Image: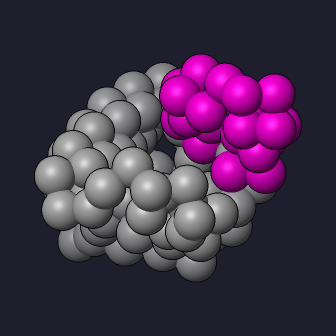
Amino acid sequence: MDSAILWRVAVVQALAILVLSLALAIVFSHGFFADWGWLVGPLAWLACARFTAWAVGLPVAPVLVRAVLAGLVSVLFVIVGQHWLGAVVAIGIFAALCAQLPRPTAGGA
C-alpha cells in the first residue's frame, strides 16, 4: 500500500466532496435531495472520484471501480440514517483501495 497515494486520494476526494456538496446545497433545496438524492449522490461521488483520479494522476477506470466499491459500503450507512458518516468511511475505503494501484509515472497516467 502506498501511503502517499492514500493520503493524497483521501484529501482530494474529501475536498472535492465538500466543495461539490456546498455548491449543490446552495443551488438546490433540501426537497430536491429528498427526491433525487439517490441519483445525485452517486453521480456526485463518481464525478469527484474522476476529479481525484485526474488530480492525483491515477488511471480513471480503476479509480472509478474503486469508487463504486467504496460507495456501496456507504449505502449501508445511508440506510441507517448516517449519510455523512458513510461518506467519511467511503473516503477512507476509497483511498485505501486506490493506494493499491501502481504509483503514477512522471509523465502522468
Give residue 35's quadrant in the image. Answer: bottom right
Q: Residue furthest bottom?
A: 61
Give the residue drawn at x 16%, y 52%. 26
Q: Residue 69, position in %: x, y? A: 76, 54
Residue 77 is left or right of residue 55, and the answer is: right
Asked if residue 55 is positioned above or below residue 77 in the image, the reply reads below
Give the residue drawn at x 59%, y 22%. 85
Asked if residue 49 is positioned above or below residue 8 in the image, the reply reads below
Asked if residue 26 is positioned above or below residue 3 in the image, the reply reads below
Residue 29 is left or right of residue 30, and the answer is: left
Q: Is residue 84 magenta?
A: yes
Q: Residue 21, position in %: x, y? A: 30, 48
Task: Between residue 47 and residue 82, name the one nearer to us.
Answer: 82
- Image quadrant for the N terminus? top right
Give the residue drawn at x 81%, y 28%. 80
Q: Residue 34, position in %: x, y? A: 55, 55
| Total tally of numbered discs in the picture | 0
Would residue 65 be visible to someone looking at this image? yes
Would residue 20 be visible to someone looking at this image? no
The majority secondary structure of the magenta stretch comes to helix
- Image quadrant for the C terminus? bottom left
Q: Residue furthest front?
A: 31
- Segment colored magenta: 71-94
Task: Between residue 48 and residue 77, name the one nearer to us.
Answer: 77
Give the residue drawn at x 39%, y 27%. 7
Q: Residue 93, position in %: x, y? A: 66, 34
